[in-house]
Image (cartoon, helix red, strand yellow):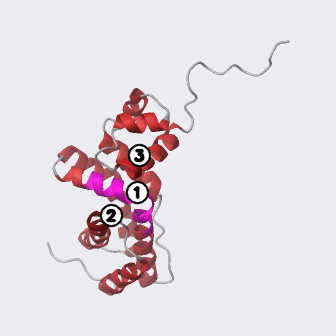
């Protein structure tokens, strides 16, 4: 009996490799910590060859940045007014950083970027810039104010994660919102540069 189904090409099917690698990355970071989550260990956890990972991402840092982009997805920026949009954004960032492996991966790649200019460029252009631009467009704020908002919110949340190993609790996220939202609830003109 002959089969009418098309023969699959040799080798592993490639659809979904990114999803598998991203899940393995976050699991490996969660289980072993950022420093011990090597590309080799991530590849083993994903069930793919190390070369498969390196063909897509030239470094662990580049992999982590794309993994974070996938984990965060688009910014919600929703609300009836600016205060609600800012509140929902802060809660969204806090929730994402609190997801298993995400905060650890973010803190780790951020720390590595401090002394690695190439990784800092990847983190800035591939991760921060799309969110910064979305916030600028949605809020009508200049770049310097949006960067300050990102610095304060993300910096505070990552600091808590780094110091305690745990995401910020809901009551503290609410307190952060109460401190930050009034500073941005009204659109202020750009500071002269």
Occupied quadrant, residue 138: bottom left
- The vertical placement of 110 against 148, above or below, is above
Whether residue 57 can be seen here: no
- The vertical placement of 63 against 185, above or below, is above
According to the picture, the residue beneath numbered tag 2 turns out to be: 165
In the rendered image, the residue lying farthest to the right is 1
Chief secondary structure of the magenta span? helix
Which residue is found at the position 61% from the left and 20% from the top? 9
According to the picture, the residue beneath numbered tag 3 turns out to be: 28
According to the picture, the residue beneath numbered tag 1 turns out to be: 102
Q: CA distance from mark 1 to mark 2?
A: 12 Å
Occupied quadrant, residue 145: bottom left
SS at circle 1: helix
Q: Is residue 107 magenta?
A: yes
Mark toward the viewer: 3 or 1: 3
SS at circle 3: helix
Which region of the structure is painted magenta?
Answer: 95-110
Locate the N terminus and report the quarter of the image it occupies: top right
Binning the other alpha carbons within 10 Å of mark 2 as few (below 14), some (14 to 19) or many (20 upward) gives: few
User: Closer to the N terminus: mark 1 or mark 2?
Assistant: 1
Occupied quadrant, residue 8: top right
Which residue is found at the position 25% from the left and 72% from the top? 148
User: Closer to the N terminus: mark 3 or mark 1?
Assistant: 3
Which residue is found at the position 24% from the left and 46% from the top? 119
Residue 63: x and y, percent? 37, 43
Mark toward the viewer: 1 or 2: 2
SS at circle 2: loop
Q: CA distance from mark 2 to mark 3?
A: 16 Å
Residue 143: x and y, percent? 27, 68
């Amino acid at each position: 009996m002959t089969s009418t189904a098309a023969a699959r090409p040799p080798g592993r099917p490639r659809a979904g490799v990114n999803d598998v690698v991203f899940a393995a990355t976050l699991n490996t970071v969660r289980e072993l910590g950022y420093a011990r989550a090597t590309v080799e260990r991530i590849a083993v956890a994903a069930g793919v060859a190390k070369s498969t990972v390196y063909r897509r991402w030239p470094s662990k840092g580049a992999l982590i940045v794309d993994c974070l982009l996938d984990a965060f997805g688009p910014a919600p920026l929703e609300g009836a007014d600016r205060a609600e949009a800012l509140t929902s954004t802060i809660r969204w960032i806090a929730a994402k950083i609190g997801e298993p492996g995400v905060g650890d991966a973010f803190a780790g790649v951020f720390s590595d970027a401090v002394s690695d200019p190439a990784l800092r460029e990847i983190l800035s252009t591939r991760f921060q810039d799309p969110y910064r631009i979305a916030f600028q467009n949605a809020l009508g704020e200049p770049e310097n104010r949006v960067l300050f908002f990102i610095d304060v919110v993300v910096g505070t949340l990552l600091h808590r994660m780094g110091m305690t190993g745990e995401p910020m609790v809901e009551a503290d996220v609410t307190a952060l919102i109460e401190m930050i939202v009034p500073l941005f609830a009204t659109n202020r003109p750009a500071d002269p540069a």
